[in-house]
Image: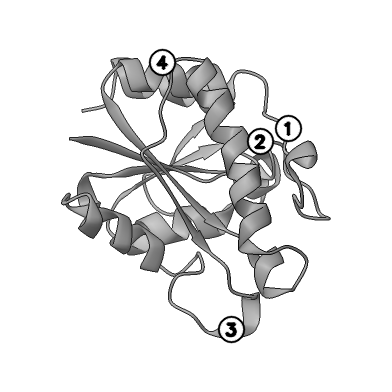
Amino acid sequence: MKLLILDRDGVINADSPDYIKSPEEWLPIAGSINAIGELTRAGWTLVVATNQSAIGRGMIDVAMLNQIHSKMHKAVHHAGGHLDAVFFCPHAPDSGCTCRKPAPGLILDIAKRFRVDAKDCYMVGDSLRDLQAIAAAGGRAILVRTGNGMKTELRGDLPAGTLIFDDLAAAANWLMYSAD
């Protein structure tokens, strides 16, 4: 199984410093939805791993998050793609949980549930915490320059071996034709 883990905000959809709090605020990044469709057709299993501290901060509830994800699933389906699951951490940053990226909890849970070794997984993210989470789980990190990705790249200190692409479409192209 080829398992690809995607961060949500900044990779699939536009990020917002005010958080994505409704389906109306969820706006896909150009090319990202089609990239998911292409990866699906190429046989990749796609899973989203996202920190959603807006829940822990009391800004939205799980029902609203589900509505946002429903919009995302519909857009992906319309492009011929499929997201096999969405894993999220609902906790605030100071909660001390093990699932909030950069901790590897979400990644390890995904690997366990999909019965794959985390070292065989790739993760596409736009922030250092995404890259640190997959690296801590032993997997392979991909940074995209969308969302916070350009700032993350400029700050440096990326996990060893991090691959860098302009966007999810470029990363998808590499994964489909060059990944081992």
Under mark 4, the amino acid is Glu
Indicate how the structure is coloured in the image: one colour
Q: Kindly identify which numbered label has been placed on residue 13.
A: 2
Is residue 153 in view from this perspective?
Answer: no
Q: Which corner quadrant holds the C terminus?
A: top left
Q: With respect to residue 67, does 51 lie above or below?
A: below
Residue matched to label 1: 27
Under mark 1, the amino acid is Leu
**Which residue does the image show at 69% across and 45% down from the upper left?**
148
Determine which quarter of the picture holds residue 109: bottom left
The residue furthest right is 18
Near-viewer residue (157 or 58): 58
Q: Kindly identify which numbered label has been placed on residue 38.
A: 4
Is residue 22 in view from this perspective?
Answer: yes
User: Between disc 1 and disc 2, whose residue precedes?
Assistant: 2
Q: Residues within 10 Å of mark 4 (few under 14, many from 20)?
A: many
How far is disc 3 from disc 2 in space, using C-alphas?
26 Å
User: Between disc 3 and disc 2, whose residue precedes?
Assistant: 2
